[in-house]
Image (spheres, rainbow, N blue to C red):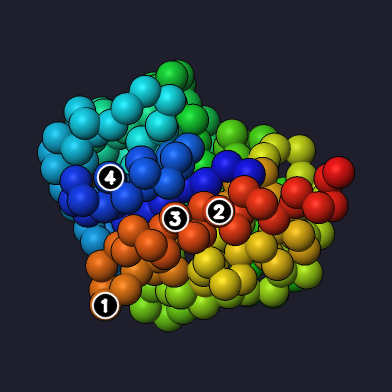
Amino acid sequence: MRIKFCGTASLADMQCAIAAKCDAVGFIMGVTHRSSDVVTPEEAARMIRHLPPFIEPVAVTHLQERQALIDLVRDSHCTTLQVQNTVEPSDLEVIRQALPYVKILKAVHVMDRSSIVTARLYEPYADAIILDTRTEERIGGTGIPHDWDISAEIVANATVPVILAGGLTPENVREAIQKVRPYAVDVHTGIKRNGVRNLEKTLAFAREARNALSKTTL
């Protein structure tokens, strides 16, 4: 199971993710809604210099204007763009043309069954869909799970990889993976202790995620 640790705000955060043998680290930049662990593109770029090979740096952003999104990726030196807010599908195509080496993840907030239609709308324009939770104030990092039955239906019918996010923790990630069968999982607040990324919880999350399907796939 592939794992992304989001909300990387310091080298200490990044070292936790590296110790857990993550596949990707997310840097939250360009926010318009309430968020935590926000960094600047320049701060992300400095941290990325210390990132080992084969770990993907992901620009996670609320920005919506396509040139701002392009500039954010270039300034941060990320190789994946996670668009957390609403954008037109055609804008994603413009971004892809400007940044052909960058993978694009489009967040879909699972509030009700309408998210099934939304995911299908973006599939032709994104390299992957990430299923997340939102509130009135936050469009990510809520710490709240959503309806995994809906997520499982999206995964079962998707034509691109689907990443599961939203309220995942070391305690529930195994059940979530077994139910949804996503391509990867993404966690932010679920590996914190006292508001700070915790090594013990990070390692536990990775262990539970990677072992989630071990019995069912034998």
Foreground label between 3 and 1: 3
Which amino acid does the dot numbered 1 rest on? Asn
The residue to which callout 4 is attached is 15
Distance in Å between CA atoms under marks 3 and 4:
11 Å
- Residue 132 in the image: x percent, y percent? 55, 63
Give the secondary structure at mark 2. Answer: helix
Q: Nearer the viewer, residue 205 or 118?
A: 205
Return the residue nearer the eye: 143 or 154.
143
Camera sees residue 115:
no
Q: Which residue is mark 1?
A: 194
Neighbourhood count class around disc 2 (C-alpha, 10 Å): few under 14, some 14–19, many 20 upward = some
Asked whether disc 3 touches disc 2, contact meaning CB atoms under 8 Å apart, the reply is: yes
Report which residue position mark 3 lands on. Answer: 203
Q: Are marks 2 and 1 in contact (CB under 8 Å)?
A: no
Query: Which kind of residue does numbered mark 3 sit on?
Result: Leu
Q: Earlier in the sequence, mark 3 or mark 4?
A: 4
Q: CA distance from mark 3 to mark 1?
A: 17 Å
